[in-house]
Amino acid sequence: MTKKKDIEVLRVTHLRGPNIWTYRPVIEAWLDIGELENFPSNKLPGLYERLTAMLPNLVEHRCGVGEVGGFLERLRDGTYAGHILEHVVLELQNLAGMRTGFGKTRQTAEGSGIYKMAFRTRQEQVGRAALAAGRELLMAAIEDRPFDLDAAVAQLTDMVESLCLGPSTANIVDAATDRKIPHTRLTDGNLVQLGHGARQRRIWTAETDHTSAIAEGIASDKDMTKDLLAAVGVPVPEGVLVRSADEAWEEAQDIGLPVAVKPYDGNHGRGVSLNLGTEADVKAAYHIAVQRGGSESVIVERFIVGDEHRLLVVGRKVVAASKGESLWVTGDGKQSVQELVDTQINTDPRRGTTEEFPLNIVEPRKSTEVQLDLQRQGLTPDSVPEAGRRVLIQLNGNVANDVTDLVHPEVAEMAALAARTVGLDIAGIDLVVQDVSKPLQEQGGAVIEVNASPGLLAHLKPAEGGIARPVGAAIVDQLFAEGEDGRIPIVGVSGTRHTALIARITAWLLQVSGRYVGMANEEGVHLNGRKVPRGPLSEWESGQRLLLNKNVEAAVFANGNRMVLTEGYAYDKCLVGVVTDAQGHGELGEFYISEQEQMFNVLRTQVDVVLPEGAAVLNASDAQVAEMAGLCDGSVIFYGTDEHVPAIAAQLQDGQRAVFLRADGYVMADGADVVATLPLNCLPESESGCTEAVLAAIGTGWALGLQPDLIGAALRTFEWNTKNN
């Protein structure tokens, strides 16, 4: 059958953990490029011009050349459709707002036309959609036919906004990544776990697992918040709780006009009306507050002259501050107020309807607060102001101008005290002051609101000229002390020889040392020796459950070769990585792995993910495994039954660690020094074929910092019978 010039996607796999391509999640696609195998890009007339016209940013792709324009050089000189598709898919994700850069494409066999392509994606569904759109775009460029790029990017952008982490949460996660703290997304929303097992912490945007429900309840009760703040000396505006419009006006007169009216249990400025000086305005504002707050209880308080400011408090420190400004439009005698707002305010690129934007779109026809301000000026959203007339749209709430460096120390101290008084570990403190560089008391300023789960975008995307503040890093530093990374000891065992047994022995070593241990191997999932139902979960999902369990203080994984190729490892890094052998290629033919030499790339990932403070425990009798020692960022411990094999001999000569067998026992040697010799009687006669497993387990225990006496005791008490374990 004659092949055609087309790209057929044969298989798509989401590798969710470290894999043969890279250490981060990727999508792997198997491609059949058909007749295009005979037509590299330099033999497809006009492809270069059409593709670069559609995706001009491809010039930024470095590719294998290692510099800007590298990919275009390859495209001009001649490269194949699978490689081109890789770069198209990456660029589509970038255009959709999900920055990615890693990609690789490899042919499975010379002249086959079958390629494996891997590309980085931060969200599986977005990545799959980008792959489909990228194929359509590339084929349109090859066949010289139209392609609606704007529509494709818009669809991907919508997916990014709805499926990926919000920008505030993403900033915290990125800060955690900078500190080498692992993260796991727990839901489709913004609930994220930082760290593993017993050392984990959780965030939900700007809330943490230390954010008190009591504190959140206090923050939503504005009257109670004011009482508490006043009691500790934080200046707050005089105010009173009312339950009717008439009472609101009566109390407003007693307090002294002008006043502010706000919901009793609202937050983030919703339903707040300011600078009210007439009975009609106060009563109208009361009804707005009831509508927005959902309660008949409303607060009437003294209006504070000045600009609204938002101070972000993390722990006991103000880490960012923004200033608000009033919104005005200028009439032209032709456009309505709504039209003026759309052309003079809503065109601000900081405004939008999604979490990506620090400021909201202003909608006078929908906002009762704006309508009240307009009504006081004798206008409605549909009024047409005369040319040159300035119209107030919003007195406050446009908080996006960075003033962090201007905050007076006493103002910062008051904000931090307000957060502590309410009990919040992260709080947005709203205050009104004329000059934030001076103490509140000097100018009659006051704290008007304390917000739980404050928005972070105003500090991440300040107005033009402002400095983006590292608020995510501040939150991560609050959760994890200096030097902490949220990691528990993780041991990964890869290969085909006794991996399950090595994992079992290692788990027992850790359990004897006093840790609560989770273990996953081909026999199932165990928590401190107790087998738990796996259910319909994959190996990767089972491993993830261990890392989510807050009881687990150490975790051990026996990884099958198929798991590495179909899912990736369940952990991003490990303290100890064990590789037993480089066999198993005979069972991996469906992955285009047919020779033992190919197993090096399958198993090397286990060594690649060892932490710098960790160790690789490698079988010295397997030459391919021994060769992996040079890939390890940490130290290396070789093990084997024969101390004279080249890898062990060289290891000892270099003054490094090895575990091997002698007639008198299992020897733990550090260079020329014998650290310990463990007796042979720990191994039952019926299990004598598992000597290598014991050697590997001893090396693993040593890499974990366990003392020889404890390792020996654990081996003597280990239950070799799986049914009894």
Image (cartoon, rainbow, N blue to C red):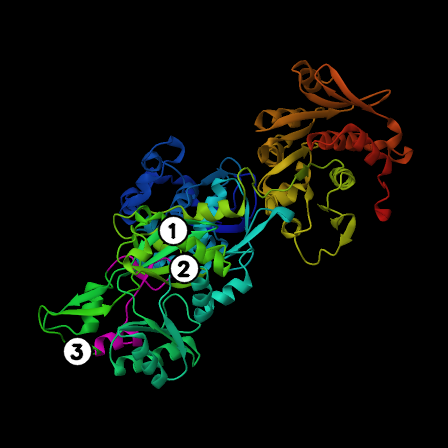
Q: CA distance from mark 3 to mark 1?
A: 43 Å
Mark 2: which secondary structure? loop
Left or right, 206 with reference to 88 = right
Q: Is residue 147 visible?
A: no
Left or right, 635 with reference to 675 = left
Mark 1: which secondary structure? helix
Residue 65 on image: x %, y %: 37, 31
Tag 3: amino acid:
Ser
Residue 234 numbered tag = 2
1 or 2: tag closer to the N-terminus: 2
Mark 3: which secondary structure? loop
Tag 2: amino acid:
Val
Residue position marked by numbered label 1 in the rendering:
412
The crowding category of the residue bearing disc 2, from other C-alpha atoms within 10 Å (few below 14, some 14 to 19, many at least 20), is many
Q: Which residues are magenta?
A: 348-375
Q: Please tell me whether residue 350 belongs to the stretch shown in magenta.
A: yes
Residue position marked by numbered label 3 in the rendering:
383
Q: Does residue 335 sit above or below 207 in this rendering?
A: below
Q: CA distance from mark 3 to mark 2?
A: 43 Å
Q: Does residue 416 sit above or below 300 in this rendering?
A: above
The crowding category of the residue bearing disc 1, from other C-alpha atoms within 10 Å (few below 14, some 14 to 19, many at least 20), is many
Nearer the observer: mark 1 or 2; the answer is 2
Residue name at image x 47 percent, y 64 percent: 228
Tag 1: amino acid:
Ala
3 or 1: tag closer to the N-terminus: 3
Q: Does residue 592 sit above or below 262 in this rendering?
A: above
Residue name at image x 74 percent, y 50 percent: 527
Nearer to the camera, 618 or 519 = 519
